[in-house]
Amino acid sequence: HVQLVESGGVLVQPGVSLSLSCAASGNIGSITGMGWYRQAPGMQRESVASITSGGRSNYSDSVKDRFTISRDNDKNTVYLQMNSLKIEETADYYCSADLLYYTSSSEPVVERAWGQGTQVTVSS
């Protein structure tokens, strides 16, 4: 099992920057890709950014050029640097980790673990 704990969510004004962190513990050797999702009230959870174990990142169009995802494999932590935050980006932000396992017959299985979320409120 892997536990993910997010932190950093606060109330901020539009236009400011904020950094979120997600610390992984447990069977961290199984972690491959990691990512950030968000869910606004009454909306579906959406992908924000992801990063592979090798450091290759991907972003949703809405955050590209403003958000940066990074990971420190030594600290088992993934970060999300968010710049120029918008009111509509108020949401619960969730960290995810893809866990690679092998069955008894050596078949790869990928499972996704989630953190409990951290609330980001962007308001003037």
Image (cartoon, rainbow, N blue to C red):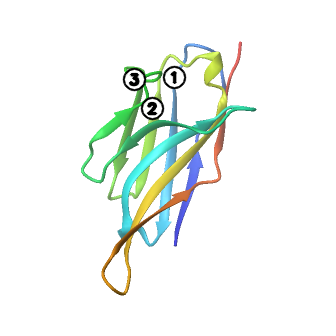
Q: Contact, CB < 8 Å: mark 1 with mark 3?
A: no
Where is residue 109? Give x, y as percent: 40, 69
Q: Is residue 92 visible?
A: yes
Circle nearer the viewer, 3 or 2 = 3
SS for tag 1? loop
Residue pushed farthest bottom? 104
Type of the residue with mark 1:
Ser
Q: Is residue 96 left or right of residue 68?
A: right
Nearer to the camera, 40 or 93: 40
Alpha carbon separation for disc pair 1 and 3: 14 Å
The residue to which callout 1 is attached is 17
Where is residue 91? Give x, y as percent: 66, 32
Alpha carbon separation for disc pair 2 and 1: 7 Å
Residue shown at the point (42%, 21%) measured from the top left: 66
Question: In the rendered image of this protein, does residue 118 appear above or below residue 48?
Answer: below
Question: In which quadrant of the rendered image does the C terminus lie?
Answer: top right
Sequence-first tag of 3 and 2: 3
Type of the residue with mark 3:
Lys
